[in-house]
Amino acid sequence: MLVSSCGKFTTEHTSVVGTGPDELLKLRAGPGLGFRVVLGLPEGTMLNRLDCGTEIGWCRVSLGAAPQITGYVSADYLSAH
């Protein structure tokens, strides 16, 4: 299920969805395409949603397995768990 608004999340735990088997979701240093890419996240990567109020369509997240790594991803590729 793809969602376009972070306001629809009922939990802080999410995962990457909708990227496909050969694509990566870009974790960025800031909320927008102009920010550098921190790393690529494959489908199914577990994330912690920290905030979605920065820019429309972007959420600040941390990696579930490494919460010290944070960045921003498009809300369109997050699914609530």
Image (cartoon, helix red, strand yellow):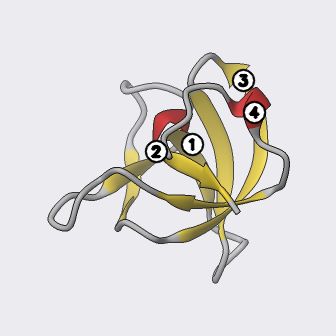
Query: Residue 30's x, y, as percent?
Result: 55, 34
Tell which circle, 1 or 2, labels the residue nearer the N-terminal end: 1
Earlier residue among tags 2 and 4: 4
- Which residue in the protein does label 3 denote? 54
Q: Are marks 1 and 3 in contact (CB under 8 Å)?
A: yes
Q: Does label 4 or label 1 sit earlier along the sequence? A: 4
Above-or-below relation of 65 to 60 = below
Badge 3 element: strand
Crowding around mark 2 (Cα neighbors within 10 Å: few <14, some 14 to 19, many 20+) is many
The three-letter amino acid code for the residue at tag 2 is Tyr
Mark 2 or 3, nearer chain start: 3
Q: CA distance from mark 2 to mark 3?
A: 17 Å
Lower position in the chain sequence, tag 1 or tag 3: 3
Q: CA gap, disc 1 to disc 2?
A: 11 Å
Q: Nearer the viewer, residue 12 or 27?
A: 12
Which image quarter: residue 24? bottom left
Identify the disc placed on residue 47: none
Q: Amino acid at mark 4?
A: Lys
Q: Is residue 55 left or right of residue 19?
A: right
